[in-house]
Image: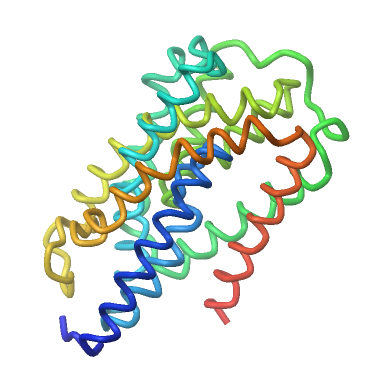
């Protein structure tokens, strides 16, 4: 890899990564998303300025995001669990299903193009953004979550798409649970636990998928860059509990609207990069 950025530019990028880590950590606590929807576009710009090959840039952004999400999701999950907001029955039922979906997602990521990953990321964000802005009371699939094996199938699919997006599962699970009448705050709290089930096998999957790939920047293990992980993790760990406090202070509808707007902003950024 040829580094094209100056020392000043790299220093500014490092500061930007730290700032994005803080925002991502707060968002992890608020929405249970692990911060990946923020980290992926930021990391993509970081790698662009470093001159990383476009063919692997998106893969590296997604893989590194999953690595960063690991401690953020754990911290957010423990904070929500301490408040008694996590549905542990759902998480226990997904211990196998979600990681299985993560493995499938990593296998797909090893063969799809960077533009395909961008398109998947943006399209899913738009669909779920519309869902949240419309309001959970206006759209419903029932009052009870599906029983196994349908619930297991849902967990597997969420594992697949969350891995392809480089997110912690909150984007998927918040929608899934609220469609079946669960309170948004419980959905957010449970999503933080799903982030743990996704991020660990997901990061390992991207290490495998990118092992030996050409053009990887220094300090990369497959599609996971340790430099990005080490810069962002400490800040996200600090910021996650702040987001949890905000989540429990917001009203149900305000949380939905904020989440929907956030997803639209992320989608626009990625669709713009495809033009």
Image quarter in which the C terminus is found:
bottom right
Q: Residue furthest right?
A: 138
Query: Residue 274: x, y in percent?
Result: 54, 77
Horizontal arrangement in the rendering, residue 154 relative to residue 61 (left or right): right
Horizontal arrangement in the rendering, residue 22 relative to residue 121 (left or right): left
Q: Nearer the viewer, residue 202 or 80?
A: 80
Quadrant location of residue 247?
top right
Query: Residue 39: x, y in percent?
Result: 42, 58
Who's the residue at 38% across and 61% down the image? Answer: 112
Disc count in the image? 0
Who's the residue at 57% across and 40% down the image? Answer: 30
Who's the residue at 26% across and 86% down the image? Answer: 8
Q: Nearer the viewer, residue 103 or 41?
A: 41
Q: How is the image coloured?
A: rainbow
Image quarter in which the N terminus is found:
bottom left
Query: Residue 130: x, y in percent?
Result: 76, 50
Who's the residue at 23% across and 42% down the image? Answer: 204
Quadrant location of residue 102?
top left
Quadrant location of residue 265?
bottom right
Horizontal arrangement in the rendering, residue 46 relative to residue 257 (left or right): left
Q: Nearer the viewer, residue 236 or 91?
A: 236
Q: Is residue 189 above or below residue 224?
A: above
Query: Residue 71: x, y in percent?
Result: 31, 38
Q: Is residue 132 above or below residue 88?
A: below
Q: Nearer the viewer, residue 105 or 10?
A: 10
Q: Is residue 45 above or below residue 140?
A: below
Horizontal arrangement in the rendering, residue 207 relative to residue 133 (left or right): left
């Amino acid at each position: 890899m040829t580094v094209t950025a100056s020392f000043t530019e790299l220093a500014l990028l490092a500061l930007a990564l730290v700032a994005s880590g803080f925002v991502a950590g707060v968002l992890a606590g608020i929405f249970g998303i692990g911060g990946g929807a923020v980290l992926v576009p930021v990391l993509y710009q970081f790698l662009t300025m470093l001159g990383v090959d476009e063919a692997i840039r998106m893969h590296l952004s997604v893989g590194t995001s999953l690595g960063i999400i690991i401690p953020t999701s754990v911290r957010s999950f423990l904070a929500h669990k301490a408040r008694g907001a996590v549905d542990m029955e759902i998480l226990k039922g997904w211990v196998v299903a979600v990681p299985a979906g993560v493995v499938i997602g990593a296998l797909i990521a090893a063969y799809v193009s960077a533009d395909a990953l961008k398109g998947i990321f943006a399209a899913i964000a738009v669909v779920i953004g519309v869902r949240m802005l419309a309001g959970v009371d206006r759209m419903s699939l029932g009052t009870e979550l599906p029983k196994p094996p349908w619930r297991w199938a849902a967990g597997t699919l969420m594992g697949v798409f969350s891995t392809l997006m480089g997110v912690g599962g909150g984007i998927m699970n918040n929608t899934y649970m609220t469609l079946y009448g669960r309170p948004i705050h419980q959905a957010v709290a449970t999503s933080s636990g799903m982030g743990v089930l996704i991020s660990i096998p997901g990061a390992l999957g991207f290490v495998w998928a990118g092992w030996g790939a050409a053009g990887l920047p220094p300090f990369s293990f497959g599609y996971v860059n340790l430099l990005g992980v080490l810069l962002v993790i400490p800040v996200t760990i600090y910021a996650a509990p702040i987001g949890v406090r905000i989540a429990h202070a917001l009203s149900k509808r305000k949380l939905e609207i904020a989440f929907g707007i956030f997803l639209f902003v992320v989608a626009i950024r990625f669709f713009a990069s495809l033009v």
